[in-house]
Amino acid sequence: MEPQEIREGYLVKKGTVLNSWKAVWAVLSEDGLDFYKKKTDRSPKGMIPLKGATLISPCQDFGKRMMVFKITTEKKQDHFFQASHVEEREFWVKDIKRAITCLKGGRKFARKSTRRSIRLPDTINLTELYTLMKDQDDGVRELKLEQENRVFNHCFTGATVVEWLISKEKARNRPEALMLATGLMNEGFLQPAGDLSKEGAEGGEQSAFLDQTDALYYFADSGFFCEGYSSDDDVLVKEEFRGNIIKQGCLLKQGHRRKNWKVRKFILRDDPAYMHYYDPTKGEEPLGSIHLRGSVVTAVEYVPDAKKYDVDGNLFEIITSDETHYFLQAATTEERKEWIKAIQAVSKSGK
């Protein structure tokens, strides 16, 4: 009997020989994690057995590279994967851990309702808490703050986080709130922004999160960026990144010149309505952007100039107001519907 497929999607994987990071199509089953060079490949590039394996998340072995988790097999082989954003990492981690637990107990895979963080009370769910903190109306407010001749965008202070947790009755006092904030940072939901908060995170103290008004932090999948004092032209460029993040994840994108298809990480923002795309294996600078104001997005069945074996279903097209065409492919039919719906909403409401 074939193993049940539990989850599939794009992840970035660290090579075991060359140590380079490359996007792969990952398929999680009850007893292992297969990864493919391309989604359309019939044979996997590799397979990671989960029986006797352990998982660490977040894995902070790679400095600035966030959203990484590590699977260590029973034979002590390490495999490193990177998700495109926090929620995606949590989904993968939760299902992989559950698969490992079920294998250990000789049971069939079945999901638990929520993942609960270790070293915190059972009633605390950090994923749910993080979602509440990001709420546009009732969450922690992201600000533009200046410190040491630098401007930190989409961030907040450690004291603000602690006070918010108390005000929302998530903690009874500042020590309890500090414990929760430290848990959120250790799990990768919150990231240190300035020198002071980075020193606290790397100092090895029991409470790495700092309850201070000059310690700056940001949400791991926010539009955070830091800049020095710059010209008006630079400010106009940065304006593209000031909108709220509506949706993000990996899609296949067709190049305009060579017409080849590559995995790109997309971040959709509103007001202004932009969709930036990145190389998921590299840094924070976008490869390009799509201005969505007045654009049209539709599902399509085929793409001109696309070879039959390059893509297989779930295609959609964005036509911008200046009539530039972008062809993209989602992993599933449902994901395509979600992207189209989100882009249509932003294109009508964003400036």
Image: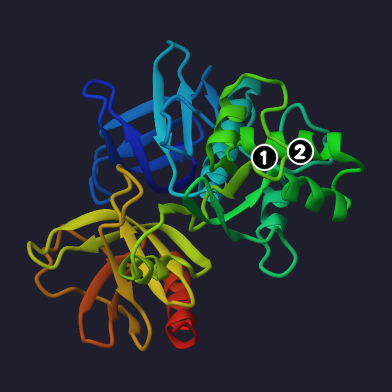
What residue would you read off at disc 1?
Answer: 184
Amino acid residing under circle 2: Leu
Could you say which quadrant of the image residue 116 lies in? top right
- The residue carrying pointer 2 sits among few (fewer than 14), some (14 to 19) or many (20 or more) residues within 10 Å by Cα, namely many
How far, Cα to Cα, is label 2 from label 1?
A: 6 Å
Residue farthest to the top?
75
Residue 276 horizontal/vertical position (percent): 35, 64
Q: Is residue 197 above or below residue 306?
A: above
Residue drawn at (46%, 36%), measured in percent from left and top? 1
Q: Is residue 162 left or right of residue 224?
A: right
The reply to whether the C-beta atoms of the residues labelled 2 and 1 are less than 8 Å apart is yes
| Viewport quadrant of the C terminus | bottom left
Residue 317 horizontal/vertical position (percent): 28, 77
Nearest the eye: 272 or 90:
272
Q: Is residue 218 left or right of residue 35?
A: right
Residue 231 horizontal/vertical position (percent): 33, 65
* Element at label 1: helix
Q: Is residue 337 above or below residue 29?
A: below
Residue drawn at (47%, 82%), measured in percent from left and top? 350
* Element at label 2: helix
Q: Is residue 93 left or right of residue 135?
A: left
